[in-house]
Structures are given as C-alpha cells and as structure tokens.
Image (cartoon, rainbow, N blue to C red):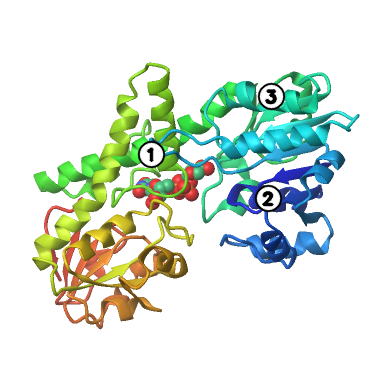
Amino acid sequence: MKITIVGGTGYVGLNTAVGLASKGHLVFCVGRTREKVERISRGIPIIYEDRLDEMLKSVLKKEKFIPTTDLTGSVQKSDVIFICVGTPSRQDGSIDLTQVEETAKKIGKALIGRKEYCVVTVKSTVIPGTTEKLVIPTLERFSKKMAGKNFGVCMNPEFLREGHAVKDFLFPKDQGIVVGEFDRKSGDVLYEIYKDFDAKILRTDLRAAEMIKYARNSYLAKDVSFANEISNICQEIGVDYLDVKRGMEMDSRIGTGRFLSAGVGFGGSCFPKDVKALVAKAKEIGTKPKMLKATLEVNDAQPSKLIELTKQVVGQFRGKKIGVLGLAFKPGTDDLREAPAIKVINGFLLEGAEVFAYDPKALDNARKIFGNKIVYVSNAEQAITSADACVIVTEWPEFADPRLYSKMRSKIIIDGRRVLDPELLPAGFTYHAIGFPRSIET
Ligand code: UDX
C-alpha cells in the first residue's frame, strides 16, 4: 500500500513509518521542519531507539521510505494516512489536541481534489471521543466529503515501549493490535496492513480503541504505584519487598508481575501524561477517578523516598558529594521526560549537595535540564569513586556489576531500583535500598 505518516519525525511516527516501510509498503514520512526531514533523509533518526538507525538506512536504500514536508502531495497519493502527532498535557493535566486538529484540517484540505477512497487513521494517543467528535467533523468540514462514503476512518493505538519500539512494532505478539473502525470497510483496509503480523487483532469501535490505550497504561501505572506503596510499607515493618514480590508472583492470578518492580517511580512520555489526561477526562464527565489520582500521588512522592533514605545515610547534604547512576526514566532510552532522576537530583541540589552524574545514553538530554548545576562524567566509576554515597536511579544492566563499585572511597550505596545484589559486593560496603528495611554491611 501507499501510506502517509503525519508526524513522521516523532517517536511514534518514525517507528511506525520505518516499520511499515520494512514490511514493503511505500511510506511518505511527513515531517514539519525541513531540517528534521533532511536529517532523516540522511538516515539519522531524531530519537535514539535500538536498531532504528540501521532499519531507516535499509528502507531509504530500498526507496520504500520518502521523508518529506509535503503533506498534501503525500495524502493525495496514499491509501492510508496515519495521524501520529503529539498530544501533550496542558497545565491542568488535560490533553492538548491542537496538533491533532491542525493535522485533520490539513488532511481534509488535501482530500478536496481526491476521487479515490482512502482511510485516515488516528494513531496518536487521544482521549476517548476525539476521533468521532473532533477528527471526523474536521475532516468532513475541510474536505467537503463524508466519512464512510468518500473516506474511511480508524483509530489504531500504539503500545510501543521506549527502548523496544522497533521490536514492539514488528513483533506485537505480546501486546496485540487494536483496530477501532468507523465502519467495516475502514477496518478492512487496516486489517490488510496488519493481517500478516503474528499477533491477535481486536476490531472494535473508535471510542473503545481510544479507551483501551488509556486503560492499559493506567493499569500498568497503577501496578507500579501499588508495588511502591507495598514496598514503602515493607520498609517500615522490616520486610524485604523483593521477598513479598516473589511471594505475590507465585499466585498465578498475579503471575510474573512485570510491573511490580518497586523503586523511584514511573516516568516517561506516556504513563504520567496518560493517567493525568484520564483523570481530567473523568472529572469532566463527573466521575471520581480515585484510583487514578492515587496512582499519581503515590508516584509523585516516590522520588522523595530515595532523597530521605540518602539523607538518613549521609546526613545533611550541604558539602556532600553524591554520585548518581542513571538519569533516563528507564534503561534503554535517552529520554528524561518525567524522569524520577530530575526530582531526586533537584532534591540533592536544593540542600547543597554536589552531584556527579552518569548515564550511558541520556547525558546530552540531561544537560538541557540541569545545565552546569551538576557534573557530567563519561563513566560510572568517575561518578562514584570519590563520592560520599552512590545513588542508583535507573536500572541500567551495567550497574548490577559489583566490580563497578570496587574503587569507591565511601563504599556507601543507595539503590533506588534494586538493581544490585548486595551479597555480591566485596567486603566493607554498606548497602541501602528502597523497599529494603535495613542496611547490609558486607
Ligand atoms: C509505556 C507502555 O509500556 C507502552 O505500551 C506505551 O505505548 C507507552 O508507555 P514506556 O513509557 O516506554 O512504555 O515505559 P515502560 O517500560 O512501560 O515503563 C514505564 C515506567 O514504569 C518507567 O519509568 C519504568 O521505570 C517504570 N516501571 C515499570 C517501574 O517502576 N516498575 C515496573 O515494574 C515497571
């Protein structure tokens, strides 16, 4: 098929565009700025994602992938048009649909001269009702055409995880594929695109597809906050949360709770934003989103648990040097959006600590946030060797290696992600952790 991706230089857009081109479709990857489109044409993704750069180069070479700023021309040549633009949060946490509306207007105008049927598909995360109440009326108004008659409409939420986006797009078995359709004809076109992917396809209505995205992310975020709440209780009653987690996972109704790892809380561009948007929507329609609000409250308070624990260990921060390992909101990405590390480091700085920070991928993005308030180092040892304490904030696999800590002067480790097994540490260390009731002297 010929496919247009609007918002093609962004996270969802680029991974979707490259993924579909690698499946043999001819993809017009529409970006807003010439600069970004030019960079992608040279095979350099705007975002860091494992394997994305090599795949981009391969689809460019096969001429299956056309980066462009020409939205109108692309839409007029395409069978399916995906809307993958950003839906950021407003101050009050509600969703900002400006980019979605602007894009629907532009696509509508581009459809004016078009005779053949095509399908416009929303892939951006949008609050339930958006496709029916905003996108379709806007498309119809600006195209002077009718949904269902001249063009079809679908809502196809993405479930890509940062750090695994390419794999999640190409092999969506674990997550499945959701196709919300305006009518059967619209859904059939999208089904054609996904039928050869080895995954279950759920066909449903537009609003349900929109809600599935929010329900999934809120469910997983709720699990993380539940784990953190239980872990905080464990800390106070002298129980190791990891023992409790193991006990919970034995119950097949819970299973290997992949989202039950306690620590400094969830971050990223999705969980916080999506739960906040759903809370705002729930309030708007007069329901009380108690669990969703609690999920955010527990999460907002979690970074201060790590700050407090560090203070208990090193005393007041003024004049202390703290080595922070991990800045990204999770391993495998360079992303610091809503990263717990921001609150943790600001907490240290506020009370006069000196912070030396290391992250395998996210230092450039950290510089945009902290400027010269902290010291950036190029490896973990430099951050911790002469520090009064080492604080682990992101569970990059390299931080699980006990040898990493051998040169530390203070030999004090505070683990905000339970990434390190204290039993493996050589003699003379003091290990503290979130959800761990005591310290271990090795
Ligand atoms: C998430 C969803 O997983 C994905 O399907 C959706 O499309 C986008 O949002 P992502 O934000 O990349 O993906 O991160 P994810 O791996 O889900 O982790 C989210 C946050 O929860 C991270 O900050 C992570 O550190 C935290 N987390 C996750 C925990 O603290 N404990 C856990 O057990 C699992």
Q: Residues within 10 Å of mark 2 (few under 14, many from 20)?
A: many
Q: Is residue 411 rendered to the left or right of residue 207?
A: left
The quadrant in which the C terminus is found is bottom left
Q: Which residue type does callout 3 highlight? A: Ile
Image spot of residue 420 (x, y percent)? 29, 64
Ligand 1 closer than 8 Å to label 1 CB = yes
Q: Is residue 293 rendered to the left or right of residue 50?
A: left
Ligand 1 closer than 8 Å to label 2 CB = no
Q: Earlier in the sequence, mark 1 or mark 3?
A: 3
Q: Earlier in the sequence, mark 2 or mark 3?
A: 2
Label annotation for residue 8: 2
Q: Is residue 97 rendered to the left or right of residue 266?
A: right
Q: Nearer the viewer, mark 2 or mark 3?
A: 3
Contact check, label 1 and label 2, Cβ < 8 Å? no
Image spot of residue 391 (x, y percent)? 25, 66
Q: Which residue type does callout 2 highlight? A: Gly
Q: Earlier in the sequence, mark 1 or mark 2?
A: 2
Q: Which residue type does callout 1 highlight? A: Ala
The quadrant in which the N terminus is found is top right
Contact check, label 1 and label 3, Cβ < 8 Å? no
Tell me which corner region of the image, top left, top right, bottom left or bottom right, holds residue 82.
top right
Q: Mark 1 points at which residue?
A: 221
Q: Is residue 330 rendered to the left or right of residue 133?
A: left
* Numbered disc 2: secondary structure: loop
Q: Mark 3 points at which residue?
A: 136
Image spot of residue 306 (x, y percent)? 21, 56
Tell me which corner region of the image, top left, top right, bottom left or bottom right, holds residue 439.
bottom left
Q: Nearer the viewer, mark 1 or mark 2?
A: 2
* Numbered disc 3: secondary structure: helix
